[in-house]
Amino acid sequence: MNHAESLSTHGRRLLDRRSFLETAGLSTAGLALTSMLADDGVLADSARTVSGKDPIRPAVNPNNPYAARDAHFNVPAKQVLVIYCPGAVSHIDTFDYKPALSKLHGQKPPELPAVTFEGPSGNIAKPFWDFKPRGESGKMVSDLLPNLGRQVDDFCFLHALSTTTSAHPQGENFMNTGFTMEGFPSFGAWVTYALGTENQELPAFVAINDPRGLARSGKNNFGSGFLPAAFQGTDFNARNPPNNLSRPNSISSTADRKTVDLLKRLNARHLEKYPGDADLAGRIASYELAGRMQTSVPEVMDLSGETESTIKAYGVEGGSELRGDYAKNCILARRLLEQGVRVVQLFNGSDPAGGNGITNWDSHSNIADTHAMQAEIMDQPTAALIADMKQRGMLEDTLVVWATEFGRMPFLQANGTGRDHNPGAFTCFLTGAGVKRGFSYGESDEFGFKATVDKTTVYDFNATILHLMGLDHERLTFYHNGLERRLTNVHGHAIKEVLA
């Protein structure tokens, strides 16, 4: 029998020496191409980040998404407190001392723009508050923030920050999510996605909103974006606890407990039927956390056990009502961190429609009055919070970040009383675990208009914070729409000079 006759046409072609060599050659080229694509991280099973590194995607158990997970490398910081001031705090009136402004006060700015974000620019204006040397380091800080000024020896200032936008919504998005557009995960969501939390009775990530309401970008500042919803921030404050915590009087505690136990058994059976349904597991985990919060949240929010000296130090009483409410938020932040919450984001400023210095730091007019009003609310409670954490030893393993979205111009607007947005230079500071103390990094020019020495970006800033939390910003990714997404997009580097 001629076996060749039983083969297909393609099979008979392989018996031909030339056809065989042709096919073998093409196959070899295909294997080589596959190997090259794998080396470049293009293939789905061998993904690489844009930096050419293997991504580190946390192994999140859908049945327990909040379980604590290991960092990429060992660092002292285990928790992070972000104090965020929406509206753009004027760096040249607070922490970035520029003597040239006093020398040229009232003059037209040389080689500076004639028109800025909100219109024509006016004359150069010296700081609205006097600067004085503070602490043993002699750091120059204005009289606007005397309480924080006394703590400069514990702070690490970044004076050459710059951003890509001069609009508040986009600026808040960029600082808190790494992108000017909406729909991206917040910093807190990335950290809790990577690390989970040590306390299973409270949320891993809590956003404490200003007593006056949400900031300009609202919940996008602490949202989960395309990450699983379990990692979004839970928002409440000392005045407004989470809704529906209290058990209705018509239901006894025994009946409530039995109901919870029954639901737990029913959920477990349902999960057995659908073991691969991550969304179902995530919803169940979220509901179970909400149940535990019915007892844990009222306890952590109860400030009645705080000493009289603590209440006085934070400024709960004796100032404006807003300062008192913000001071209570500061105490709440400390108590949440004491209970092991991984990320706490504390807002000082609000108003999604803008406030022109009344509800946030956006001072386009009457900056002398509006910045003073915001400082009265923020300065004493924030300084007391940091001092209290230091006294309790919490700064040994907690990183504190004080930030705003951009700075303000060295000259006045045409109205002669306010400063416009300045994306070219602004100041933020760090303190606590892993950070140099009494240190300043980077410089803006003589007017505070542009970052010049050791210029850093928001990408660098976020990369540094992730590094201080033990996370490699180039490798912490989430695969979304065909890309290995990360907080810092394709940019940024950790600022090693500020590390202790």
Image (tube, rainbow, N blue to C red):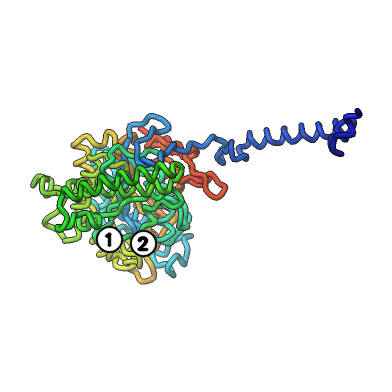
* Residue 10 location, quadrant: top right
Provide the secondary structure element on which disc 2 rests: loop
- The C terminus lies in quadrant: top left
- Within 10 Å of disc 1 (Cα), the crowding (few <14, some 14-19, many 20+) is many
In the rendered image, the vertical position of residue 358 relative to residue 59, given as above or below: below
In the rendered image, the vertical position of residue 197 relative to residue 178, given as above or below: above
Which residue is depicted at the point 33% across and 48% down? 286
Q: Which residue is mark 2?
A: 216
Q: Which residue is mark 1?
A: 371
Q: Is residue 113 left or right of residue 296?
A: right
- Residue 335 position, x and y percent, is 21, 44
- Residue 403 position, x and y percent, is 34, 50
Which residue is depicted at the point 33% across and 32% down? 76
Provide the secondary structure element on which disc 1 rests: helix
Query: Which one is in front, 19 or 107?
Result: 19
Q: Amino acid at mark 2?
A: Arg
